[in-house]
Image (cartoon, rainbow, N blue to C red):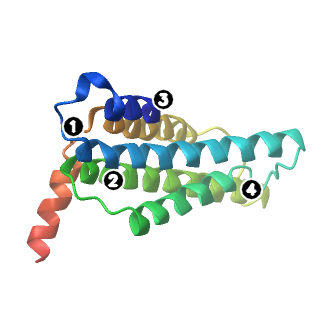
Amino acid sequence: MTTLLNFVRMSGWQFKNIDKAKLKEPLQLSTIMFLSYFIGSVIDYFVNLKELISYLYPNTYFLLLDILTVLFIYNCVNTRSEQGKICKTYLLVGLLCNSLLFLVIQIEVFLVFEGLKSYQPWWLWYVFAVGVNTFDAMMILVLLLHKDFLKLHFLFNQCQLRNE
């Protein structure tokens, strides 16, 4: 949905007086995120269709896809506009946090599968469920608004200035 909205913003007749270069980078980033989540949905569909889900590694493909998307965005997407840099920062933070949550859950499932931990619901499962959805919502919002609403980009810039 954000890809479509950013595409309309960039090509719409009502936005003729704005600088389209500022909208190009968020459109590219939202397209990359759309493709990443689309590929994840297709993989999830076929895994569930063929019943290939392993009890040991149920969501590993989401972890790997998030890591590959982070590497692609970090290495291949060059941002020049402030909106592009803000979107890139939020996407990298959101995807890395999602990856960390997927990794922690994978470790939990491994420990339960090996019998090193008993299977019982605990707070980590709730943190996982709320955290993944919260980080996804944060990434969607930044692609829609193009604003540094949590001041993450500002904080990263401050840390870089102190290190120099």
Whether residue 119 is visible to the viewer of this picture, yes or no, is: no
The residue pinned by badge 4 equals 57
User: Foreground mark, 2 or 3?
Assistant: 3
- Measuring from the top left, give residue 20's x and y in whole percent: 25, 41
**Residue 10 vs residue 68, the one in the foreground:** 10
Q: Secondary structure at mark 1?
A: loop
Query: Where does label 2 land, which residue?
Result: 88
Q: Are marks 4 and 1 in contact (CB under 8 Å)?
A: no
The kind of residue tagged 4 is Tyr
Q: Please report whichever mark, 4 or 3, sits nearer to the chain's N-terminal start.
A: 3
**Residue type at the position of mark 1:** Phe
Q: Residue at x 43, y 60 (%)?
A: 73
Q: Position of residue 58 (x, y in %)?
A: 74, 50
Q: Which residue is mark 3?
A: 1
Regarding residue 92, the answer to whether it shows in the image is yes
Residue 122 vs 75, above or below: the answer is: above
N-term-proximal mark, 2 vs 4? 4
Q: Is residue 110 left or right of residue 124?
A: right
* Secondary structure category for the residue under label 4: loop
Between the C-alphas of marks 2 and 4, the distance is 29 Å
Residue beneath disc 1:
149
- Is label 3 in a helix, a strand or a loop? loop
Q: Which mark sits nearer the N-terminus, 1 or 3?
A: 3
How far apart marks 2 and 3 lie (CA) works out to 18 Å
